[in-house]
Amino acid sequence: MQIQNMMNTPPVCVSESESLENAARHMADSGVGALPVVENDRVIGVVTERDLVVRAMARGLPTGSPVKEVMSTDPVTVEADTAVAVAILIMRSAQVRHLPVVAEERLIGIVSFDDLFWQLTQELADLAVVVDAARKVPQVFHGTDKAPLLDG
C-alpha cells in the first residue's frame, strides 16, 4: 500500500508568520497534531503540538509569536507513491511522527504515525479473518484427504 491511499488531504497548513495561537486553533479545529509550514506551496517546516508546548509555552513565548520561532525546519517529506513500510522506516530514522506528502516538492497531504498504525492494525485484523477462514476449509482442499467420488 502507498501513502497516497491514506494521507490526509487537503492538508491543514500555516505560514511561518502565523501566530502560535492561530496554529494551535487550526490544530484543535482540525483534530491534527501537526501542521506543515508552507511558503508558495512548498514545505519549509512543521509545527507540532509538542513544539507549541515545549518550545513555546515552556519558554514563555507570547501567543502572538510567529510559528517560525518554534517550527522544525528542513522537514522530512515523502512522495505520494512511497510505500507504507518505507514511510514507517523514514519516521523511525528521522524520529518524527508526521510526514508531509509532496508531489514535485509541493504539499499535497500529510500522514501521521497514527494513520499508519491504524491502517496496519486494520490490515492485520483482515488477515486474521482470512487465516481463521482458511483453518475451517476441509482438509480435502489441502490435498491431505481423498474426496469421495459421487456417482451420478
Image (cartoon, rainbow, N blue to C red):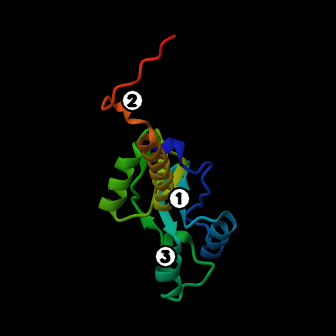
Residue 147, horizontal then vertical, whole percent = 39, 24
The residue to which callout 3 is attached is: 50
Eyeballing the image, is 7 above or below 142? below
Cα–Cα span, label 2 and label 1: 53 Å
Q: Is residue 24 left or right of residue 46?
A: right
Residue 30, horizontal then vertical, whole percent = 66, 63
What residue do we see at 63% from left, 78% from top? Answer: 64
Q: Earlier in the sequence, mark 1 or mark 3?
A: 1
- Closer to viewer: mark 1 or mark 3: 3
Residue 60, horizontal then vertical, whole percent = 53, 89
Eyeballing the image, is 59 above or below 136? below
Residue 35 figure quarter = bottom right
Check the image and name the residue furthest to the right: 29
Under mark 2, the amino acid is Phe
Q: Do the residues under discs 1 and 3 have CB atoms within 8 angstroms?
A: no
* Quadrant position of the N terminus in the picture: top left
Under mark 3, the amino acid is Arg
